Amino acid sequence: MHPIKPAQDLQELAASLASVTRNSSQLDVLIFGAGLGGLAMFEVLIQFDGIRIQGIVDVDDNAVAFELARESNIATYTDRDLALKQFKGDIIIDVTGDATLYNTLFEYTQQHQLELISAKSAKLLFELTSKELNSERTIENQSTRLNLLDTLLEITLQLEQRPELRDITSRSFADIHSHLNALKGIAVIFNREDGRPDLIGSIGVELPGCTNIHECNLSACNTIINVCKSLQQHERYKIINDGFMLSCTELRNSTYNLILPLWQDSSLAGALLFDLPLPLNKEQETIIEMASVHLNMTFKTLDHFRQLEEMAIFDGLTGVFNRRKFDMQLHQEISRIKRTKNGTLTCGFIDLDDFKQINDTYGHQAGDLVLKHIADAIESCLRDYDLCARYGGDEFVILLPSDDAMEGPRLEMIGMRILEKVTKFHMVNEPGLKASISMGLATQSCENADAETLLKKADEALYRAKNAGKGCLQIIVDEQFHYRADD
């Protein structure tokens, strides 16, 4: 038998495969040789959907490829004749390099109109398919990364709407779980008030009726807290080789071995827990790194947005709303009250009496304490939906909306309660420092609601209160002066 040149060998291989694939959507293959060459060929071909390996043949029953074949439920033969007799397929691949065997197989394939790939051709086939598989894996990995980047981009674009951390975490958790091919996972956000984890999502774990981990089992809650405490600040992820179990009836004693922390600046805002086959491959590590960096930047951005919003609408000294927030709320309440049948809107201006004298006598720090006390006193007398804001300097303003008419006596009761609370200010090291306010309230009905007029009348009521003396309340209801209450 004459040796075949590589170029000729490749041409014959291509022609051989082409002739079979023209008549079949699936190729049935029998491999001769279960050594290292047969193992390599087996591992490559088994990954192709269009190729079905019917069996593998070797004289050694302990050949290395036999074990993998048996795990894959593929027939193994030590009897060559039996293998050929039972083979009902398209291609025989000989990787043995045995010339005698090749001649026998060549005669057999000629008789039965089968294709035969020699050892040299099999080597070429292995190299070609390996290269194709590597290209497919590269494309698949790049596609996975692009899909993840698309998801992360969508999350970034949502930042303009200031989404809740829970929503961002839940959405990210599902996509990361999918890209990692994790067996199961849960997502938690740490409660700002008590630091305990709230469960916001799970995959691969059924959680009927379980919303807060610390409600369903204290042990599971403490396990998550302790695992998170072991994280170094800004650590992107942590692998726990032995895993950690969440002992909980709802969680069914589930075990996890990877934790992806969600940092919000230096604070741990949440965590994603996954159960993954270890060790991680390079692509999984890349996905986790990408997701971690993006999520932590997202959380940091949302926290900065929150801080900026608070700075924009809250007074830095007293903690109540500022004038900007008041102006926004006033126009919203005017529009709302106009849609009611019997609604009223009350605006009140409150001014600290003798504020300059307090600052000059006791210092600006004492003056700041007085302003904080007044803000606390006002807010303690208002309802949840009322608004208190620092209008500027020593002046505060309040909004009291009501869907049913708020008459003068009720306004007087609220006003007098605020006046009384303010007078209870006390400084241990300055017992002579007293505080009092003057207050003017103006109320408009839904028919007469107008922002400019309401502010003008409230200011007029305050002016009257100032002229009437310290610690005084004046009320104007629907532009009519009705009430006067002196301390």
Image (cartoon, rainbow, N blue to C red):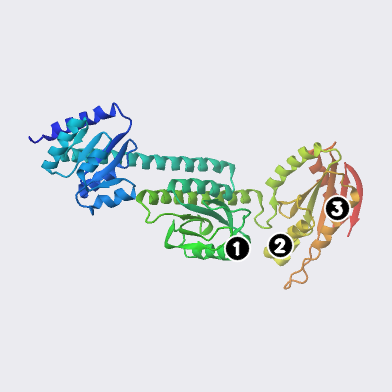
Tell me the crowding category of disc 1: few under 14, some 14 to 19, or many 20 or more residues within 10 angstroms, Cα based: some
**Nearest to N terminus: mark 1 or mark 3:** 1
Marks 3 and 1: in contact by CB < 8 Å?
A: no
Q: Which residue is mark 3?
A: 465
Residue at the image point whose x is 34% and y is 37% from the top? 49
- The reply to whether residue 134 is visible in this rendering is no
Note whether 24 is above or below 318 in the view shown. Answer: above
Q: Is residue 67 visible?
A: yes
> Pointer 3: residues within 10 angstroms few (<14), some, or many (20+)?
many
Residue 375 spot, x, y in % from top left: 74, 57
Left or right of residue 326: residue 439? right
Amino acid at dot 3? Ala
Marks 2 and 3 sit apart, C-alpha to C-alpha, by 22 Å
Residue with the mark numbered 1:
217
Tag on residue 367?
2
Q: Amino acid at mark 1?
A: Asn
Residue 212: percent from left, percent from top: 61, 57
Q: Earlier in the sequence, mark 2 or mark 3?
A: 2
Tags 1 and 2 in contact by the CB under 8 Å rule?
A: no
